[in-house]
């Protein structure tokens, strides 16, 4: 292990990210879909941070067992929970908000474009996370991970500070119930408040 590498921190964070429940016990549930979207945003940011830790780890230690497990967990998160989250927004939240005003329609359009950019970056990362032992240039991998994390941070900041704030004021309780029900259904969860 090279000097300055904080291996214990990586292990602690790796243990936290291998939880099987995609929503920690303290997270909002489907009866608070906007709160749940915010919680998902935080988990995305956490996984971006773990991705950067993985890139550092690969540079210092190569694709050891720890890196393989971390890569698999990050891959699993972004191919399941993150995809559900984007579908929650694009199929349910965005269309409803885009009808409210030209300003919101423009914001939704920009956020959908950012989803496309994030998806393109993910398509570059995905095969590398599936086979981290084949990463020939750890520096280039780190740069790709950094671009992905920076793009997600900016995107999430806009969604949290603009989109979700406006949604909080616009959506009725009935619309929030429908949004929560759709999010639950997408994940195969049956809820009893409808």
Image: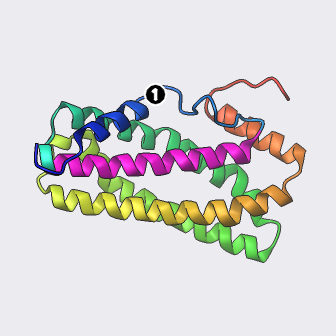
Could you tell me which residue is drawn at 19 percent across and 48 percent down? 5
Q: How is the image coloured?
A: rainbow
Q: Is residue 34 left or right of residue 90?
A: right
Q: Is residue 71 visible?
A: no
Q: Residue at x 13, y 43 (%)?
A: 61
In this rendering, is residue 46 above or below 170? above
Image quarter where the N terminus lies is top left
Mark 1: secondary structure: loop
Q: Residue furthest front?
A: 4
Q: Residues within 10 Å of mark 1 (few under 14, many from 20)?
A: few
Q: Which residues are magenta?
A: 32-59
Residue 39 in magenta stretch: yes
Estimate the x, y position of residue 83 in percent, counting from the top left.
52, 45
Please indicate, yes or no, whether residue 150 appears anywhere in the rendered image: yes
The quadrant where residue 16 appears: top left
Position of residue 57 relative to residue 164, above or below, is: above
Q: Is residue 142 left or right of residue 31?
A: left
Query: Which quadrant of the figure has residue 139?
Result: bottom left
Frontmost residue, 42 versus 87: 42
Image mark count? 1
The residue sitting at 23% across, 38% down in the picture is: 67
Residue ID for mark 1: 19
Classify 152 as above or below 45: below
147 on left or right of 135 = right
* Residue 23 position in % (x across, y down): 58, 33
* Main secondary-structure element of the magenta-colored stretch: helix
Question: Of 84 and 27, which appears nearest the observer?
Answer: 27
Q: Position of residue 20 (x, y in %)?
A: 47, 25
| Residue 133, magenta (yes or no) | no
What quarter of the picture does the C terminus occupy?
top right
Residue at 80%, 56% (x, y): give it: 168
């Amino acid at each position: 292990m090279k000097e300055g590498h904080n291996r214990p921190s990586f292990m602690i964070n790796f243990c936290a990210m291998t939880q099987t429940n995609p929503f920690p016990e303290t997270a909002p549930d489907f009866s608070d879909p906007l709160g749940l979207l915010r919680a998902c945003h935080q988990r995305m940011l956490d996984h971006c941070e773990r991705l950067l830790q993985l890139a550092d780890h690969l540079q210092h230690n190569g694709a050891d067992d720890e890196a393989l497990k971390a890569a698999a967990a990050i891959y699993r998160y972004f191919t399941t929970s993150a995809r559900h989250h984007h579908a929650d927004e694009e199929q349910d939240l965005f269309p409803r908000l885009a009808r409210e005003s030209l300003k919101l329609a423009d914001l939704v359009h920009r956020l959908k474009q950012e989803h496309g950019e994030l998806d393109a970056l993910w398509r570059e990362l995905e095969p590398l996370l599936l086979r981290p032992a084949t990463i020939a240039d750890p520096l280039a991998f780190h740069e790709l991970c950094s671009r992905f994390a920076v793009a997600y941070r900016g995107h999430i900041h806009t969604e949290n500070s603009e989109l979700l704030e406006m949604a909080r004021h616009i959506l009725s309780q009935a619309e929030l119930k429908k949004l929560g029900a759709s999010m639950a259904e997408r994940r195969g969860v049956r809820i009893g408040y409808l």
